Amino acid sequence: MAAPVLGVREAAEAVLRSNDRGGFTRSASVLYPHQWSWDSAIVAVGWAHLDLGRAITEFEGVLDAQWANGKLPHIIFRPGTEEYRPGPELWDSAAAPEAPTGIATSGLAAPPVHATAALAIWQIGTGRGSRSRAGADAFAARIFPALLAWHRYLARERDPDGSGLLSIHHPWESFDNAPEWDGPLRSVAIEDVRRVARHDIEHVPSAERPSEAEYARFLGLVASLREANYDERLIRRNHPFLCKDPAMTSLFVASSDALLELATVVGAPRRELSEINAWGDLGRAGLERVWDEADRLCHGVDERRGTALRARSIGGLLPLLAVLGPHHRAELLAELDSGRFAGNSSLRWALPPTVSPVDPAFASRNYWRGPSWPVINWLLWIGLHRSGFGGRATRLRSEALSQLEAGGLAEYFEPFTGAPLGARSQSWTAAVAIDWLERATPG
């Protein structure tokens, strides 16, 4: 197996270097030419194994686009790169009083993986001797205030009722066209798709992407946010899409735990340690409240209607990252390994599809409605270790590397045939491949 794995390592490094634009890494050539925030945070973990300084530049570039209220936007539009549509004109976020000056961004929040990634970068850096440790420690000290502001934004603006569950304003803040959003999206006004050229279906078959009807409602939500000028109070009062999301919450809990470790590294005051610790505890309690014993998953909540979002999708398994109580952890593992997910005998590799094949919404080639995503497998690998299932994490890592060895560094894969889908040279797929090959365990 040594030679094929070496081939994955070399290919992954080549992808990162080919997508490197100096201050940032394209998420993928052609399809994603700008800087997507959560992609970039994970890409920085891959860079840390190759060049710690380059990893730090990548990560700090994400923080340069932070809004005054602490929000990290999900896209940073970098000048001088290839055209991407819809671009910054769709968002008109520069008109918002809290948007950064001189940097064009979207108006949405990114999935909060940043502190998890930052801790990994620090750990990789500190494992390389005293000189590297000094650089890693300095990095932690510089980024900690921005990450603390980011988490305060999420706790304050995305969970104002203190439920422990974070809200999203748009499916693009989570898993774009996952079936749990189908119900809430039905009430969203449709925008004319014809006036906004779609970059994605010019480069990827439309069967692999959100439909025109879904995209029209996505644009309708952007119009609503634009009308509110991204004012969080107006959004909470009037915006048609407001959903408590277990996936975003799980990422926040894991990142809060990572931020607590970074807080210790930088010598943060006790009140900040207490504040960060409370976010993790509150999030775990919130996730356990939306646990469904029959489905063995956490389900989101449509806040506008007060109803559960009952899709059998990967977001309900991500609470493995949050380290819930022993019963919930055991049941999540059992569901992951059941025939509804990674235990399905028809899968090419024992890796979970993003939607269970038994769910009526399952579509094996369509974006977040069925394909297997390497980046999600990487998050589950971290979650399995965090939840105490190290042996299972090792098996997942092995299967995931086999997938990449056979199919290349694609964005996502058809779960039964193993066919690569989406972008073929995806930077975060390359980054997680490098991390898997360099670290047998996270942390």
Image (spheres, rainbow, N blue to C red):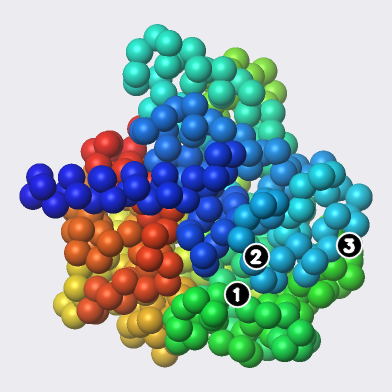
Q: Helix, strand, or loop for circle 3? A: loop
Find out whether the residues at labels 3 and 1 contact each other: C-beta distance under 8 Å. no
Q: Which residue position is annotated with label 1? A: 199
Image location (x, y in percent) of residue 387? 35, 46
Q: Nearer the viewer, residue 277 or 214?
A: 214
Direction from residue 228 to residue 186 in the image, left or right:
left
Numbered disc in front, either 1 or 2: 2
Q: In this view, does 279 lie above or below 303?
A: above
Q: Is residue 347 above or below residue 2?
A: below
Q: Quick one: which residue is furthest to the top in this view?
A: 130
Q: Is residue 349 above or below residue 288?
A: below
Residue 42: in sight, yes or no?
no
Direction from residue 376 to residue 212 in the image, left or right:
right
Residue 204: in sight, yes or no?
yes
Crowding at mark 3 (Cα within 10 Å: few <14, some 14-19, many 20+): many
Residue 120 is labelled as: none
The alpha-carbon separation of the residues under discs 3 and 1 comes to: 25 Å
